[in-house]
Image (cartoon, grey):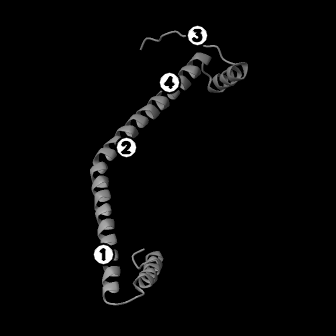
Amino acid sequence: MPLKRINVQLPEDVYQVLVNLASRRDESISAVARKMLADAVVVEAANDGIDKVTEAVRKAMRDVLKPSEDRLAKLMAKAAVASATAMYMNTQCIADLGKNDALELYQVARTKAVAYLKEKGEEE
């Protein structure tokens, strides 16, 4: 394969390391530098490729998950409205039954519900 010529200036310490490597390997400085540069280019290209693949996978996952996330958010909003409606209807029913302390009963029930939700269940 034909080679292209480039001129590179190196700091003295890098040059000395390159000279020592070439001497130990019994190769020319150019051959050692060429191999090291080729290896670095391959690694850099692979890293760029991984970045591109990672970006594409993340975008694809966002596109796939977004409809499910939106649907779950809508269901949670509906559940919150239904829960709040039931809470106020229960409080009103307790009051309509002649209990004067309906609001106090609500507060006690709410405190117990919060404590219940903080407990670790068997499935956790």
The reply to whether dot 4 and dot 2 touch (C-beta < 8 Å) is no
Q: Which comes sooner in the sequence, label 1 or label 4? A: 4
| Element on which disc 4 rests | helix
Marks 1 and 3, how far apart in space? 79 Å
- Residue 73: give its label: none
| Element on which disc 2 rests | helix
Quarter location, residue 12: top right
| Element on which disc 3 rests | loop
Marks 2 and 3, how far apart in space? 40 Å
Q: Nearer the viewer, residue 51 or 29?
A: 51
The reply to whether dot 3 and dot 4 touch (C-beta < 8 Å) is no
Marks 1 and 4, how far apart in space? 70 Å
- Tell which tag, 1 or 3, sits nearer the viewer: 1
**Dot 3, crowdedness within 10 Å: few (<14), some or many (≥20)?**
few
Question: Which residue shows up at 68% across the image and 23% down it?
Answer: 14
Q: Nearer the viewer, residue 45 or 61?
A: 61
Question: In the rendered view of the protein, which quadrant contains the C terminus?
Answer: bottom left
The residue at which mark 3 appears reads as: 7
The residue at which mark 2 appears reads as: 58
- Residue 38: give its label: 4
- Tell which tag, 1 or 2, sits nearer the viewer: 1
Callout 1 amino acid: Ala
The residue at which mark 1 appears reads as: 86
Callout 4 amino acid: Ala
